Amino acid sequence: IRRNSSVVYPVSKGEYPPVKRLDPMHKKRILVTGGAGFVGSHLVDSLMLLGHDVICLDNFFTGSKTNVTHWIGHPHFELIRHDVVDPILLEVDQIYHLACPASPRHYQSNAVKTLKTSFFGTYNMLGLAKRTKARFLLASTSEIYGSPAVHPQPESYWGNVNPIGPRACYDEGKRVAEALSYSYARQDNVDIRVARIFNCFGPRMNWNDGRVVSNFILQALENKDLTVYGDGKATRCFQYVQDLVDGLIRLMDSDVTEPINLGNPEEYTINEFAEIILKMVGEGKETTAKVVHLPAVEDDPQRRKPDITKAKELLGWEPKVSMLEGLRGTVAYFRSTLDDEH
Ligand code: NAD
Ligand code: UDP
């Protein structure tokens, strides 16, 4: 199912990407909530290419129909506009539960709604999994570790989260989503998988979501200064979206019910990251853009790096696309999207 990291659908208008023919024994009906979002739409692509029937459910808060238009009309594909806060009746074999805004700008814009999405959304999807006996995978996050006192972060670390700060709606929302998942597993034998996802980037990222990758690429392409919040010494690790999607599918198809970190352990300070993007985007071009420092944001985790020993041992998974390789593809994608708009 690996695709060249430079292939982003649609490749040519009017043609469906080539889906595999699966025999009915292996073909599953798979629900992807948040399937029109950044990660969700790449996951939908991979599941469709594998030959499954895919139901993409989204309320289009941060996602967009254009992320999945290349599948509309395909006999294996269904798109449903629905908010996971409300229950829904469907018949499915697997549920990838991704519906939830992921960028601080979006999840903080309506904190109560983010909490409702995390709690009621996960509750509804677990209820659906219980009724249909579908396997359920939760897209959790490295944010459940908060501002970590342990580095790198193994799954056994319980985290250091401010429960009343501006990020709490997301961090605590995902923590309760994990607690709900394990409670349903213990109490009702729901078959669950939990992926703790670390920062991810790639084509189809929402470019007004205020996250560091999209901000810096856009700023550099528009010859504007790159805005580093605070001293820029905070670290992050960035994984390419196709690696993450492969990890999610491996986890879903495994017997592993404990939480699993999915991330790329290559660690950069935000200052280093800004310099890398400035250099990459500026190659062979006149540019006056430079790095500027703005006030630090509240509760910004200072260090973050996944310990992926478990993913390696239990899933045989590790990232294949280096940060630099993925970044080149993403810059090219943003550049062509900008060119299309002008
Ligand atoms: P995204 O914002 O692009 O996608 C989320 C999707 O969910 C969007 O299409 C949005 O419209 C939809 N959605 C939001 N609230 C909904 C609701 N109430 N009902 C139905 N649909 C709803 O974000 P993403 O980066 O693709 O993240 C996908 C998942 O992965 C999220 O659960 C996120 O928490 C998790 N995650 C992402 C990252 C990352 O770096 N991208 C890191 C950790 C965890
Ligand atoms: N960041 C920054 N400039 C920006 C956007 C983000 O310096 O224009 C910093 C932010 O303060 C944090 C890191 O980059 O230290 C990653 O931020 P992002 O919002 O992408 O993700 P998260 O904090 O959720 O990991």
Image (tube, rainbow, N blue to C red):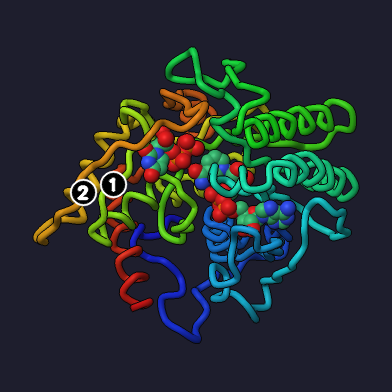
Viewed as shown, does residue 188 lie left or right of 6? right
Q: Residue 278 — which label? A: 2
Residue 148 x %, y %: 50, 18
Q: Quadrant of residue 250?
A: top right
Packing grade of label 1 (10 A; few <14, some 14-19, many >=20) is many
Label 1 with label 2: CB-CB less than 8 Å:
yes
Seen at 45% across and 70% down, the residue is 9
36 and 167: which is toward the camera: 167
Q: Is residue 297 above or below residue 13?
A: above
Viewed as shown, does residue 71 lie left or right of 257? left
Q: Is residue 265 above or below residue 15?
A: above
Residue 244 x %, y %: 49, 45
Q: Amino acid at mark 2?
A: Leu
Q: Quadrant of residue 28?
A: bottom right
Seen at 24% across and 35% down, the residue is 272
Seen at 41% across and 54% down, the residue is 202
**Furthest residue to the bottom?**
14
Task: Work out whether residue 248 can be spotted.
Answer: no
Residue 8 x %, y %: 41, 66
Q: What residue is disc 1 on?
A: 226
Seen at 60% across and 33% down, the residue is 167
* Mark 2, secondary structure of its residue: helix
* Mark 1, secondary structure of its residue: strand
